[in-house]
Image (cartoon, rainbow, N blue to C red):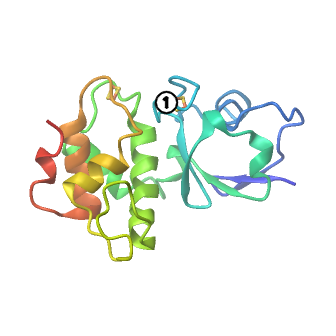
Amino acid sequence: MPITINNRVIEAPGDPRVSLLDFLREHLHLSGTKKGCNQGACGACTVLADGQRILSCLALAIQYEGCSITTIEGLSGDGALHPLQQAFIEHDGLQCGYCTPGQICSAIGMAAEIRRGVPSAVTADLANTSIELTRDELRERMSGNLCRCGAHNGIIAAIGESFGNQPGLAEAAE
Ligand code: FES
Ligand code: FES
């Protein structure tokens, strides 16, 4: 069964050992998704699978047959950047840019989790499905995406502006 990647229907690799990350980068030459640690620790390889964020280095491509994968290359449309990509530029949410595709895909998945009322480790009221994207929620929910350049202030400002609009989010990363 094929995999849909950025709205293109593509045959899954014949070799069942190929990770989704390697399938994207090496087979399809979609190099926007980055390989950092290749062991689930840095978040650089985050993509969206049917709208949910996943670490593509820990996923086998064939697991996602029949699914729709969105990478950073699939977020922009008609030549226009996704609003969160634009916000990263405006808030200097990057330096070298290596973590940025993963940060952006992760934040989009995170916002969908908030909308679905999925609690995090810092959500006080587990019965409340109307979760506010506070600075603590944002820090916790994005803690799987590391930035070795230390651009976290700009990253949080960009995500906060796009999905939270909470006063003080820009100061969330000390
Ligand atoms: S490359 Fe996948 S989490 Fe680091
Ligand atoms: S911008 Fe360089 S690792 Fe985040």
When asked about the image quadrant of residue 60, the answer is top right
Residue behind label 1 places its C-beta within 8 angstroms of ligand 1: yes
Which residue lies at the image location 68% right of the left edge and 29% below the top edge? 22
Image location (x, y in percent) of residue 21: 64, 34
* Relative to 54, 104 lies left or right: left
Closest to the observer, 79 or 173? 173
* Relative to 109, 30 lies left or right: right
Locate the C terminus by quadrant: top left
Closest to the observer, 137 or 13? 137
Where 39 sits versus 85, above or below?
A: above
Q: Is residue 71 visible?
A: yes
Locate the N terminus by quadrant: bottom right
Image location (x, y in percent) of residue 46: 52, 41
Indicate the secondary structure of the residue bearing disc 1.
loop
Closest to the observer, 114 or 122? 122
Please name the residue that numbered disc 1 is placed on. 41
Where 87 sits versus 20, above or below?
A: below
Which residue lies at the image location 14% right of the left edge and 48% below the top edge? 170
Identity of the amino acid at label 1? Answer: Ala
Closest to the observer, 78 or 71? 71
Quarter of the rendered image showing ligand 2:
top left
